[in-house]
Image: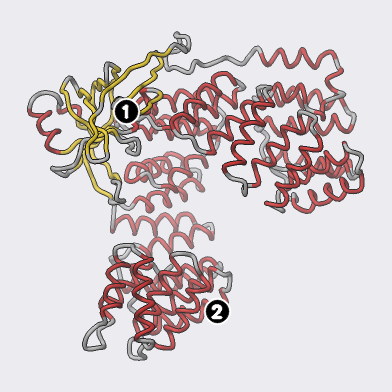
Amino acid sequence: MLALMSVISLQVTSFAQPKKRSYNFTRAVEEAKEGNNTKAMEFLTKEVSENPKNGYAYMCMAAIYEEEKQYKDAMQNINVALKKLPKKDKKSTAMALTLRAHLFTTSGDTVRALPDLETAINLAPDEYEIMDSYANLLYELKRYDDSDRIYNRMVTGNPAGINGYMGLGRNAFFRGKYDDAVKHYEGALRLDDSYSSGYAFRGESYLKQGKYHEAIDDIIKALEIDNDTKAFFLLFDFPDEQTKLVVTRLKGMAAKDPYEAYWWYYIGQVYNEHKHYAEAIKAFKKADEIDSYPDFLRFIASCYYELGDYGNALLTINEYIRQDSDEKGKMLKADILGDAGDVDSSIAVWDEIIESDPDYFFPYYRRGFMKDNANRSEEALEDYDMAIMLEPDYAYAYLGRGDMLMRLGRTEEALEAYRKVTELDTVPGDNSCSMYAMLALGEKDKAIEFLNQTIESDPTDGALYYDAACLYSRIGDLGKSMSNLRIALEKGYPRYHHVRNDDDLTELRKLPEFEALLQEYESKVTAIPVNNKQEEEVSVDNERVEIPFIPEGGCLSVTCSINELPLNFVFDTGASTVSLSQVEANFMLKNGYLKRDDIIGTDRFMDANGNISEGTIINLREVDFGGLKLNNVRASVVRNQRAPLLLGQSVLGRLGSIEIDNPGKKLIITHSK
């Protein structure tokens, strides 16, 4: 894809034909370079009004429209640009053709994209960004030999560039030539041994070869460099029997970097992926101890939920919502309440979610499901219909609609809904529901075959065996229903309240062994305390602390002691960590308030203006905020002598509920003892 800044950079150098550039065009380029697209567009609009022959202005407008995802306007402007750009400026014409090719591919029209790119590389044979776009499109079309031809040109013409090697490696990988892929990625890494993607892609090739030790070494390296996203997701591609290897290597990095929370976060996610929820909770808690981050609480709550420990799940998700009241937390809370048996409270939370975002289909479906469980059939039907209106391709909503219509005696409409389910849900998997619709349509054998295929897709998933229990109960085969229910519970299916109230299991619940089976597995659910000390009980006692503040320039200044040194901080709920300037950090180091061992390393962070800077990361052994003491708090040292001292979420998130009393000029903290 041709980036906006590539176009702007080109215009800075290429638009030199007139003796003097116009004011409007010059200002547009300046604003675009600063990321002020709206302002840049205002100047460009004036420019084309006063100078309609300026093809460069249209090209810049097209690039801005493309970045803003206004593709129709982008296409109109790039077509005008191609007519008005000077014929002798082959480089600009080539980049304009590349941008148009990208717009074609965005709309799925690769037929017209290819000729534009072919022309572009002929006009500008030394522009490797254009070559890369062309080779990438050929790769996407699975024309690997043609793509290789372009990537080899890049390697030959620009031996210091890594994109050619990476492209060749990717093409080899998708041919199944993993040894060749590794060699190409090694070529990129020889040029830049700090290129995280090179390690991640090479690790992926090793994974395909079953070379798990080599794979995890590369993935760890990519994560260590810059928390590479591809490397993170590759952690979940190791087979279950390699979980110990992955976790052991991650724990080694956690020991090496004891103040970096993300290693424990990765460990938690690996355990979570493999359904080792108790271990995942412990890992997420260690991450939270190092760097209090609200999402860690959401992950912990989710694991408690998967274990069926609804009490601790609810306590934890409530704390998450207190710190970060977003829809993800509220949806998890609604599900926890519903599965814990408090259906009315669950519906109330879904009401709140829908009120804040009435155009999202899923909350209507889930609220309908809860109303379905409460036998509020007409209301459930209304919610299923709303979900279908907002998302016509969601099979589960049609299944719910069919079940409600059947319950209400509207058989023909119900059968139509079931047929829609089978049209939408054709590939058996962990989110399938077609087997229920097939059975309702009288296709029992087909339903059982589809069910068996869903179980084969992931035999470790207890929820799929629960589906089997429900389907066989609907069929009337209570023996198979009971045996599948036992397997589901054995594999960790935790929703006991739902099992006791699910209409699908009405006949099964009449058997005397049903309740005994549930009680057998319920007794195995071991609550893991919300606090980090296993031997302590969760305390609900709170204390109230009041801390005075001083208003300064629209901010709140508060006193906070760091390692027994009193400092004035800006109270900033938007900051993720504590940050100090170099002045304070140097003073603390020289006077014994910081030790050499407290200096962890460096990290990159973003300030309120969106600027990314690199700073030193330190460990604050003790933070005393109004008598509330926290140990081992991560902080950033900003390389700016005049930077304010900010008190962020790594402290605030661990203190408790915070209220601002503006008239009394004090912060009121309700802290759990």
Query: Disc 2 designates what residue?
Result: 112
Q: Nearer the viewer, residue 430 or 166?
A: 430
Q: Nearer the viewer, residue 116 or 39?
A: 39
Number of numbered discs on residues: 2
Does residue 303 appear in the picture of this structure?
A: yes
Q: Nearer the viewer, residue 468 or 669?
A: 669
Label 1 SS:
loop
Q: Nearer the viewer, mark 1 or mark 2?
A: 1
- Where residue 464 appears, as percent x and y from the top left, is 71, 34
- Where residue 318 appears, as percent x and y from the top left, is 51, 26
- For disc 2, the neighbor class at 10 Å (few under 14, some 14 to 19, many from 20) is few
The amino acid beneath tag 1 is Pro
Q: Please say if 56 is above or below 142.
A: below
- Where residue 273 appears, as percent x and y from the top left, is 54, 35
Q: Please say if 51 is above or below 168.
A: below
Q: Would residue 667 be found to the left or right of residue 590 on screen? A: right
Q: Residue at x 71, y 26 (%)?
A: 488
Q: Would residue 333 be found to the left or right of residue 607 on screen? A: right
Which quarter of the rendered picture does the N terminus lie within? Answer: bottom left
Q: Would residue 175 be found to the left or right of residue 285 on screen? A: right
Label ID, residue 663: 1
The amino acid beneath tag 2 is Arg
Does residue 450 appear in the picture of this structure?
A: no
- Where residue 188 appears, as percent x and y from the top left, is 34, 58
Q: Quadrant of residue 629?
A: top left
Residue at far left of view: 590
Label ID, residue 397: none
Q: Earlier in the sequence, mark 1 or mark 2?
A: 2
Q: Please say if 40 is above or below 166.
A: below
